[in-house]
Image: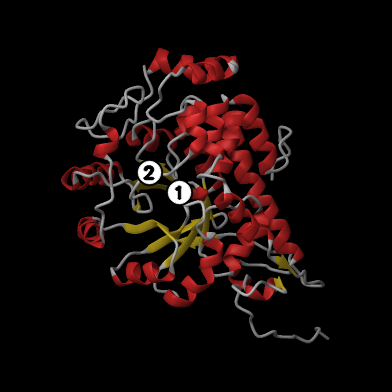
Amino acid sequence: MSSNHMGFYNIEDLRQGAKRRLPHGIFEFIDGGAEDGIGVQNNRDAYTSLKVKNRVLIDVSQRSAETEIFGKKIKMPYGISPTGAGGLVYYGGEIGLAKAAARMGVPCTVATNALLPMEEIAEGAGGNLWFQLYMWADKEMSMKFLERVKATGFETLIVTVDGPVGPNREYNKKNGFHTPLKYTPKLISQILARPGWCYRVLLKQYLNRGAFRKENYPEEIERRVTVASEEMSVVKTDRQSWEDIRKIRDMWKGNLLIKGLQSAEDAVLAADEGLEGVILSNHGGRYVDCAAAPLQVLPETKAAVGNRIKIIIDSGARRGSDLVKAIALGADMVMSGRPTLFGAAAANEAGAYRALEIFYDEMDRVMAQLGLNTIEEIGPQIFWNPPEWVPRPQLGFRAAAE
């Protein structure tokens, strides 16, 4: 699409750029998974284990990755997942991420834990913005908060449901990193080792806004990220149930999705409750280290729910070919959070857009090489000798045109 690659030719280049510019603890907070990192690697292995077959002598000059999700056209079947670290990678990062998505023509999800108010992000970026909700222990407070989300104009709500307890991210403890931020000696030394970050992010934050805050939290919750207070007891969610989703369904008339599913059984329940979609996700390998990759449970989920609801998959996509593989297995769209965060850390808004551009260019190239003109043509017939969890379609042979 653009010739201004800035020296970043793939998502790994952006990741390395982020690593060079961010304090070590903040980079590992974004990049790492839970415990031994097995889940993160398994997410990638699931994608890379799938091999495809190219098709030749097919006119693909009119190919397009454009599709539609919830009644809106998008340039490719991809969206930015909710991340609470946008403001830690560069000042005003959440707006930059949303602007990049709007420019590309794909959805971007604003997180409850964002460091900018949702209203400011919506006004400053526009585009196809979704909102992600973490339920609080005070259910009444959560329902009241939804009124603010509706008033801001969001049409699609994602309720994250895969964190009944906090994850075991040992590297955060070793790095002295914590959210809310605590300026431990180790973290301070890491920050001082990145003077550019101190100027681009930390100094601008304190001069313009003061301490980092989770700006979307209600006043009843301590918002200063530098003070732990009683946040963990307030956000505890191990009492969540389907009854909470029913109450949200009754109140929220827009598109409602739940994120963090890893089973076909839960997807069927979501469809039965009248939700518009589910997001298969293991939180990027950041919660249960031994969890299956969402891509691995996608085929059985599609078989269980069919076209009753939209199936979106999150966790592990790093190449445009990954988008093609996920669509072939039944996904309606793919989401991820790290790639655009890496881009934003490496080169601000332009870097986030570059991440999206890489996905688009790679997907377009793979579609051409596989002889595919539209998203609708993508299916399991593209795979060569797939593993047993991938459905094997009946091969169809068409005669060459006379």
Residue 114: x and y, percent?
39, 35
Quick check: 70 above or below 136?
Answer: below
Residue 106 visible, this angle: no
Quarter of the image with the C terminus is bottom right
Q: Say which label, 1 or 2, has the lower sequence index.
A: 2
Colour convention = secondary structure
User: Which labelled disc corresponds to residue 166?
Assistant: 2
Tell me if mark 1 has few (under 14), some (14-19) or many (20+) residues whose alpha carbon lies within 10 angstroms of its own.
many
Q: Residue at x 63, y 72 (%)?
A: 377
Name the element at disc 1.
loop
Residue 322 visible, this angle: yes
Question: Relative to the observer, which residue lies in front, 278 or 116?
Answer: 278
Q: Residue at x 65, y 57 (%)?
A: 45
Quick check: 356 above or below 279?
Answer: above
Mark 1 → mark 2, Cα distance in angstroms: 8 Å
Which image quadrant is residue 225 in?
A: top left
Q: Residue at x 52, y 61 (%)?
A: 292
Residue 188: x and y, percent?
50, 16
From the viewer's perspective, tell me whether residue 133 is left or right of residue 141. Answer: right
From the viewer's perspective, tell me whether residue 202 is left or right of residue 237. Answer: right
From the viewer's perspective, tell me whether residue 125 is left or right of residue 362. Answer: left
**Disc 2 residue type?**
Gly
Residue 96: x and y, percent?
50, 33
Question: Relative to the observer, which residue lies in front, 378 or 206?
Answer: 206
User: Which labelled disc corresponds to residue 287?
Assistant: 1
User: Which labelled disc corresponds to residue 337?
Assistant: none
**Disc 1 residue type?**
Tyr
Name the element at disc 2.
loop
Residue 99: x and y, percent?
50, 37
From the viewer's perspective, tell me whether residue 65 is left or right of residue 148. Answer: right
